[in-house]
Amino acid sequence: MNDFPAYTLVDTETRRITSHFVQQAFQISVARPLLHPEDRPTSYPVLYLLDANFYFGGITEVTRLMRVCNEFPVTIVIGLGYPFDGPVNEMIDMVSGWRTRDFTPVVSPEAEHAVLQDSPTLQAVTSGGADAFYQFVTQEVMPMVEAEYPIDPANRTLMGHSWGGIFGLYSLFRDPLLYKNYLICSPDLPYADGILFSYEEAYAQTHDSLPAKLFISQGGRETAEHNERLVSVLESRQYNDLSITHKSVMDCEHCASPIPSFVAGLKALFS
C-alpha cells in the first residue's frame, strides 16, 4: 500500500476518555457546526451517535450537506466510539466485542457466542454492561462536551443501530427526558427473550407520560414484526407527550439500513 496521509474530516476533532464506570478507553469524535453567514445561534442541537467507528463520517457529512440545502438545522455531532489503530478487520472484531458489552442491558450467553462465531480475532466477549455505559455517557461524556461546546441540553438526540438501538430503547425507558429525540434503527428486540418489552411494561406501571419523539425503523428486507409489536404496545398505552414514527427502509438488509434509516429519521424528527 502507498504511504499517503490518512483522510480526515474537516472541522472535526477526537479525544480519548478512560471511563471510570466502564474501565475502558473511548474515542469521542466531535463534528463542529457548519455555519452560514446568517447563522447566529447561541446553542445547537446535539446528536449523540453510537457506533461512531462505523457511522461518524457518514452522519457528519450527510447532516452538513442537508444543512447546505437548508433541509436540516445547525447541529453538533458527538460520536461515541473506541480507539483502535490496527487493521480494519481487527477493528471491526474488537468493536463488535466492546459494543456487545456496552449496549446490552443483561447478560446473554447466546449473543456472546454469536459474536465470537462472527469475529475470528476475538478470544472472549462479555455482555450486559449497558448500565455502566449509560453512566459513562451521562456522567462523563455529556458534562464534558456540554461544558466545552454551545450545546442545547434540551435538544439532544440519541442515534443507535442494532444493539445500539437496544441501548437507545433502554435509555428511553430509563429516563425519557435525557434526550428529546430517539432515533432507533433495526433494534434487536428479541435480545434476551425480549427484555426491552419488560422494561417498557415496568415503566408503564408507574407512568402515564413518555415525553419523547421516537423514530424506529428496519430495513425493507428485515422482518418488521418486532418493531410493529413495540409500536403497537406503545400506542396502546396512550402515553402523553409521545410521538412515534415507524418506517421501513426499502431494499435494505440489516447492515445496509443504518445510513438511509438515520437520514430518514433525522428528516422525520427535525421536520
Image (spheres, grey):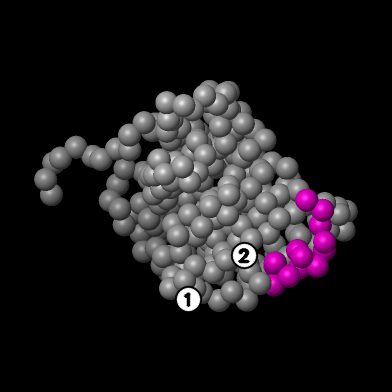
Q: Nearer the viewer, residue 20 or 255?
A: 255
Looking at the image, residue 89 sits to the left or right of residue 60; the answer is: left
Quadrant of the rendered image containing residue 180: top right
Secondary structure mostly seen in the magenta stretch: helix
Total numbered labels: 2
How far across and how far down the image is residue 116, in percent? 45, 65
Q: Nearer the viewer, residue 84 or 154?
A: 154
How far across and how far down the image is residue 185, in percent? 54, 60
Three-letter amino acid code of the residue under disc 1: Arg
How far across and how far down the image is residue 51, in percent? 47, 50
How far across and how far down the image is residue 227, in percent? 63, 69
Q: Nearer the viewer, residue 75 or 50?
A: 75
Residue located at (80% from left, 67% from top)? 236
Q: Nearer the viewer, residue 197 or 128?
A: 197
Mark seen at residue 246: 2
Looking at the image, residue 266 sits to the left or right of residue 242; the answer is: left
Mark seen at residue 74: none
- Residue 269 visible: yes
Three-letter amino acid code of the residue under disc 2: His
Residue located at (43% from left, 30% from top)? 35
Identify the element where label 1 is drawn: loop
Q: Earlier in the sequence, mark 2 or mark 1?
A: 1
Marks 2 and 1 in Cβ contact (< 8 Å): no
- Residue 127 visible: no
| Magenta residue check for 42 | no
Identify the element where label 2 is drawn: strand
- Figure check: 210 above or below 219: above
Mark seen at residue 221: 1
Alpha carbon separation for disc pair 2 and 1: 15 Å
- Give the magenta-colored segment's residue range: 229-241
- Figure check: 245 above or below 41: below
